[in-house]
Image (cartoon, grey):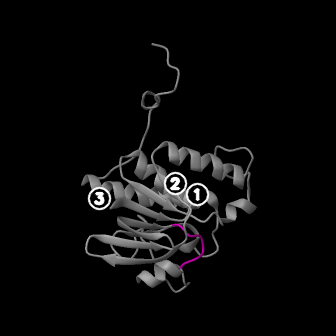
Amino acid sequence: MTDVAIIGGGPAGLSAGLFTAKNDLDTVVFDIDQTWMHKAHLFNYLGIRSISGSEFLAIARGQTRDRGVELHEEEVTSVETEDKGFVVTTDDGEYDAQYVVFATGAKRGLAEELGCETTNEGTIDVGLDMETSIEDAYATGAMVRPEEWQAIISAGDGGAAALHILSKEKGEHFHDFDTPSDVPWLDREE
């Protein structure tokens, strides 16, 4: 069983995966690479002057892989609850996971089929921690925000979901804050 199954490999999914894998949770991201990011050019993403969406994704995927995320190019066809989590089904097989994060842009079908409640606007209803009405199931980005399709907002939503998962796992409020001493490849004067 994997700890965290993330459906969608755009900014929200990759951000969630980065946080969970970096903090020792077994994490799998399922993605078929049809994100809107391939049509984007980022000028308004804090810390990035100018980059194509496709180049951004290549860097983000490499970063998540470096931290231990497994990337599966598989389309998820269903997500169901089971006694101790979820069963994520693809054309290639079934995967058990303790947590599931939906990061599928405006595509809300899988979350709705799982039974996640929706708002009057038709978005998936979540709290500030991005948890849905189904315990241990999270939704992020455009699926929870009507017409607010911004990469940086989605990445923040993914981070918020991941931090809530990590807080549950650790049994206390968890934050992910690195300092230069945490980065092994930085040159430091001794």
- Range of the magenta residues? 103-108
Q: Amino acid at mark 1?
A: Pro
Given contact means CB atoms under 8 Å apart, are the residues at marks 2 and 1 in contact?
yes
Q: Which mark is residue 15?
A: 2
Q: CA distance from mark 1 to mark 3?
A: 23 Å
Question: Badge 1 is on which residue?
Answer: 11
Disc 2 packing (10 Å; few <14; some 14–19; many ≥20): many
Task: Classify residue 40 by image quadrant.
Answer: bottom right
Q: Report the predominant secondary structure element of the magenta stretch.
A: loop
Disc 1 packing (10 Å; few <14; some 14–19; many ≥20): many
Q: Residue at x 32, y 55 (%)?
A: 167
Q: Amino acid at mark 2?
A: Ser
| Residue 165 showing in the rendered view | yes
Question: Badge 3 is on which residue?
Answer: 168
Q: Amino acid at mark 3?
A: Lys
Task: Classify residue 87 by image quadrant.
Answer: bottom left
The quarter of the picture where the N terminus appears is bottom left
Q: CA distance from mark 2 to mark 1?
A: 6 Å
Q: Residue 15's spot in the image, x, y percent?
A: 51, 54
Q: Residue at x 26, y 70 (%)?
A: 84
Q: Is residue 28 left or right of residue 142?
A: left
